[in-house]
Amino acid sequence: MAVKAISKTASQTPQTENIIRRQKDYLFPCVANYYETPLVLTEGKGRHVKDTEGNTFLDFFGGILTVSIGHADERINQAVKAQMDKLGHVSTLYPTEPIVDFAEMLAGVTPGELQQSFFSNSGSEANETAVMLAQLYTGRSEIVALRHGYSGRTLVTQALTAHSTWRALPTQFAGVKHAVSPYCYRCPFKLKYPSCDVACAQDIEELIRTTTTGQVAAFLAEPIQGVGGFIVPPKEYFKIAVEIIRTHGGIFICDEVQTALGRTGGNIFGIDYYGVKPDIMTMAKGIANGMPFGATVAKPEIADSIKALSISTFGGNPVCCTAAIETLKIVVNDHIPAKSEKLGQQLRAGLNALKQKHPRTVGDVRGRGLMQALEFVEDETKGNRTPNPKATVQFFEETRKRNLLIGKGGLYGNVVRLAPPMSVTESEIDEALGIIGEALASMKA
Ligand SMILES: Cc1ncc(COP(=O)(O)O)c(C=O)c1O
């Protein structure tokens, strides 16, 4: 087949060029890469990764909040290698020790009456399972999701996702209603917290009454909207929203795909901060430190509502469960939630100081724990909050030059997401802040 030429940058080795060219030739074009010239990574250890050009980067995105503990963590890798040598795969037709061990551990750390798990391979599948479960349990079909939310790439989860940029097809799954996002920086009602009385949560009542049969199956929401650009709902948000849903007979599906395992600081789960107990919780990304894993955890009476046969061939695979067990042990034994809170405060303080220094472009700094974001706008000093994706792209290139990896988010592609592996150290946070400061300064010039 014809091989398309790509532009070669001065620093590219033939190996880098070759990989980038074959990525273009043999992967779907929608498998988008960061940076003007994609970065080809070869190795990782702790919080660092290396590329094919011999550069080392400090990783502040951890494979999209997935490498929770760090790259090539010896404790996790040793356990995974041993399990691989012992028993790699049998399917869920047979119970194994790793699958029941992990399910039991999850029941021990998840809030309220969450107890039984269904394991799959991704966040999309975990959410798809949760929606199916909610519909079967309630005998209803309508789901309330949130604008700016991201739920996955399957047909149902694309319908739940409220980002046109991530929707390849028109909605194929009826009955999803999107409530406004608790996005204080861009309040949909142009109000200010706390005098707003959390109008975004209160509005769910009106949404249900006006756009549904009034008989909803569930409310599905992330404790912090990840892809949306680390949008943090106000403290009272979930109590109000979930009470409204329950009054209308629906249940609460909490999507902890990005926020689980201490990421938001202080607690193991993002929802713990809000003092609300979900009926179903979904997890993926960071729960197995990079091994493919999706989990849907439910109350027993809800889990019991799938009467048909249901299998995920790879879900709960012993090797992935072993990775998940080791990851969760480290989270608990190394007090990761407390560390994430403390280190998150350090990162946040540094980012706030940088916002003071660059008040024009940095419109907002937000997040919790080791999940912090910068929102780039045209000119905050003049109250011009027009999203500035161009500045974000420039910031990406400037931080890459200085060997720091970061993430992007937000409906408008103007939010920088920072979420390092949670084993990050104080000095690495200082190093990242130094690079971010230099990158911001270089953009001003
Ligand atoms: C909150 C949330 N839910 C679900 C998903 C889908 O997960 P996956 O990409 O593993 O299917 C994502 C992925 O970014 C996510 O951020």
Image (cartoon, rainbow, N blue to C red):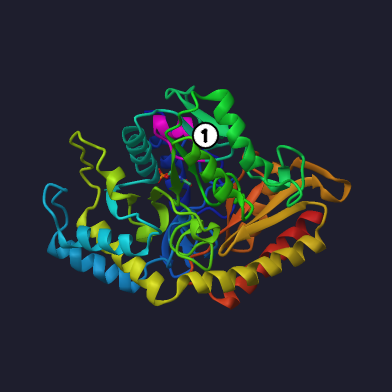
Q: Is residue 415 visible?
A: yes
Residue 226 or residue 248, whichever sits in front: 248
Residue 250 lies in quadrant: top left
Name the kind of residue labelled 1 in the image. Answer: Trp
Could you tell me residue 332's position as x and y percent?
A: 39, 72
> With 204 as the anchor, is 96 left or right in this view?
left
Task: Give the quarter of the figure containing the C terminus.
Answer: bottom right
> With 345 as the anchor, is 130 left or right in this view?
left
Q: Is residue 75 magenta?
A: no
Q: What stretch is highlighted in magenta?
A: 150-160
Q: Which residue lies furthest to the front in this view?
A: 247
Residue 91 or residue 114, whichever sits in front: 114
Could you tell me residue 148's position as x and y percent?
A: 58, 39
Could you tell me residue 371's position as x and y percent?
A: 57, 59
The residue drawn where x is 55% and y is 30% is 208
Residue carrying label 1: 166
Q: Can residue 29 be seen in this view?
A: no
The residue drawn where x is 68% and y is 48% is 392
> With 398 as the anchor, is 409 left or right in this view?
left
Label 1's element?
helix
Residue 178 or residue 367, whichever sits in front: 178
Q: Is residue 31 above or below residue 274?
A: above
Residue 439 or residue 270, whichever sits in front: 270
Q: Is residue 231 above or below residue 270?
A: above
The residue drawn where x is 51% and y is 41% is 150
Q: Is residue 156 magenta?
A: yes
